[in-house]
Amino acid sequence: MNYFEENSTNSLDQTWAFINCEVADHVMTLTLNRPAKKNALHPQMVNEIAFALSHAHHNKDIRAILLKAEGDVFCSGADLKAFMGVSEEFESTIPSTTKQVLMGEIFQEVHKPIICQLHANIMAGGLFFLTGSHFVIADQKATLGLPEVKRGLFPFQVLAALVNKISKSNAINWCISGDTITAQKALEWGLLTEVVESKDLKTATEKIIEKIKGNSPNAIRLGLEAYERITKSEGEHQYLMEMLQKTIMSKDAQEGINAFKEKRNPVWTGE
């Protein structure tokens, strides 16, 4: 885990800048709370998520984790400005960590069932919330997009996470095409567990949680620990993060990002 047990087992009564976190009836509910920025992933938001997940990992009373989001977009991916050092002021009591937090790994290390309640559209790095969950209950109106190649970037880490969930051909074709797909298509691919009408989303989610709580927490924890062991590739996401940083500095990436801001078609040079 990114946070040691002594750092994360204290009360969750913290000052959270980008998420809300609460525990009730053996369930931790982690809610993305940056709706004005479409819940774009800020570095401190990632730290807060890692801290909350570490708390869940070390707390035997927590038997499941529910991922939710405020606003009309579940998550729009990484906040590139923030990751490049341009960020607004914020107040958070969650400490930084000496170990780099990699979204492709933090969900695997929890060893608790994770349920994502996908109420709205999600894209780019936001897909980590789906690939990191064991159950994803989605609103039938939600869409899922991987637009990175349209900006001169590539979803390196997302690709690595996707190939553990869907076929390799669907994963790489999606990353190359940059398409947006429907919830129904994602269900057919195996990325989602269930697709329901908006009015049934909460009930369907609660049904999954109650089923989990009726089973042995210890057996599930040990099973997920074994699952991490047989599926995790050491160093994979560190390498992919470095590839992303290399791509961000390319001329194509700068052109793609600028074209998106200026609402025009990019002019690629292949550099």
Image (cartoon, helix red, strand yellow):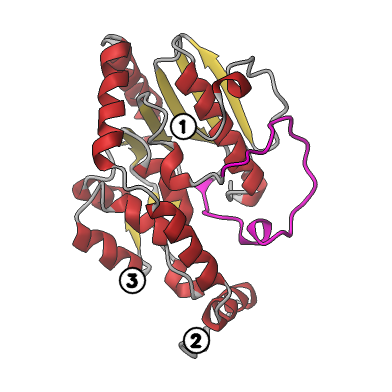
Residue 153's label in the rendered image is none
The residue tagged 2 is 271
Per the image, label 2 sits on a secondary structure element best described as loop
In front: 249, or 86? 249
Q: In the image, which is nearer the foreground, mark 2 or mark 3?
A: 2
Q: Which mark is in front, 2 or 1?
A: 2
Q: What span is in magenta? A: 73-99
In terms of sequence position, does the residue under pointer 2 or pointer 3 come before the other? 3
Q: Position of residue 54 (x, y in %)?
A: 51, 27
- The numbered mark at residue 67 is 1
Q: CA distance from mark 1 to mark 3?
A: 28 Å
Residue 97 highlighted magenta (yes or no)? yes
Q: Quadrant of residue 113?
A: top left
Amino acid under label 2? Glu
Residue at 77%, 51% in the rendered image: 88
Q: What's the residue type where badge 3 is placed?
A: Ile
Q: CA distance from mark 2 to mark 3?
A: 17 Å
Q: Which residue is mark 3?
A: 176
